[in-house]
Amino acid sequence: MLIREAVDGDWPSIWPFLHEIVSAGETYSWPRDVDEVTAREMWMPAAKSRTVVAVDPDGTVLGSARMYANHMGPASHIASASFMVDAKHSGRGVGRALGEHVIDWARTAGFRGIQFNAVVETNTRAVALWRSLGFEIIGTVPEGFRSTAHGYVGLHIMYLKL
Amino acid sequence: MLIREAVDGDWPSIWPFLHEIVSAGETYSWPRDVDEVTAREMWMPAAKSRTVVAVDPDGTVLGSARMYANHMGPASHIASASFMVDAKHSGRGVGRALGEHVIDWARTAGFRGIQFNAVVETNTRAVALWRSLGFEIIGTVPEGFRSTAHGYVGLHIMYLKL
């Protein structure tokens, strides 16, 4: 599996699974009814961040990640990132590969740590994955997320020192 | 002291102390060299948030607060806010009045909690003020902020259940 910079032409491959994930409303704090133009602007913004896709040897887009500084100015040395993996390709290590890629990128770019602001407590696969990559939960917003399946659940803030 | 909706005409009063606070680089994770147009857009954005000013009986602007949903979609029931108080008017309860105003606003608007994402550990007056209003520290990003005076210091995430 190759991870490369996402380009404009990847958007038609990303939008279907991104839309599926966001509209399910179980793991992302985005508006469930987000329109395509807004979603594209949010996932592939023009500057100051980086968006990549994970691609199969045959060119199929398996997932995508976005990485950026979590705050500005005197707090701009901590990175953050968001991940979307196509459910059709889950269980193949796409999330892990994207996570490792983000860690390498942030380390190389000179960030001192990576902070995830909103990892849904019931998204246990994501929590386990980030833990296995060295992230720890540094705090949990009680009832910070409203899950369709589980009602109000906690929203973890996770951190990795680089 | 009155707290009212901030209007376009308040910006010339806000910009000097906002600029002073941000360029000092001690308490805010904004670019220290932020220009006026960008700062205005960030502090008084057009929609989906609310910006107020605290005003003296003679009309002097003493400080300002901005309030908004911390996340979107299924996590949009937690509010967040930012505060700027003119140092010339500190010690007069401006921050407390603005904080109480934000709490009332968030409660009335139906939010279930308020989360502050970046309270600088060495900004002890702010930490003490938010604690006195019922906020608790739910996590701290280690070395999340680079202070000119103290080097790398922690960045608290504070939370109030409504």
Image (cartoon, coloured by chain):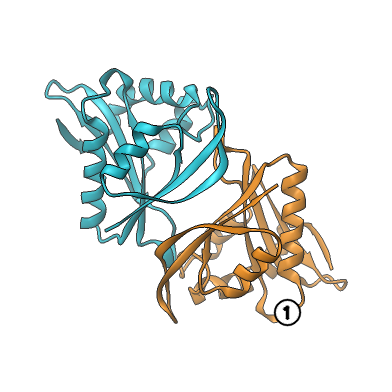
Chain colours: A orange, B cyan
How many discs mark residues in the rendered view? 1
Q: Residue at x 23, y 31 (%)?
A: B94
Q: Residue at x 70, y 66 (%)?
A: A132
Relative height, residue B15 to residue A39 (above, below): above
Where residue B1 sits, quadrant-wise, is top left
> Label 1 belongs to which residue?
A91
Picture quarter with the C terminus of chain B = bottom left
Where residue A81 sits, quadrant-wise, is bottom right
| Residue B53 shows in the view | yes
| Residue B83 shows in the view | no
Q: Residue at x 13, y 20 (%)?
A: B58
Could you tell whether A56 is left or right of A24 in the image?
Answer: right
Relative height, residue A127 to residue B11 (above, below): below
Percent across and percent down for residue B8 are: 30, 32
Percent across and percent down for residue B2 are: 15, 33
Percent across and percent down for residue A134 are: 69, 59
Q: Residues within 10 Å of mark 1 (few under 14, many from 20)?
A: few
In the rendered structure, which amino acid carries the disc numbered 1? Gly
Relative height, residue A127 to residue B27 (above, below): below
Of residues B35 and A126, the one drawn nearer to the viewer in this rendering: A126
Of residues A105 and A2, the one drawn nearer to the viewer in this rendering: A105
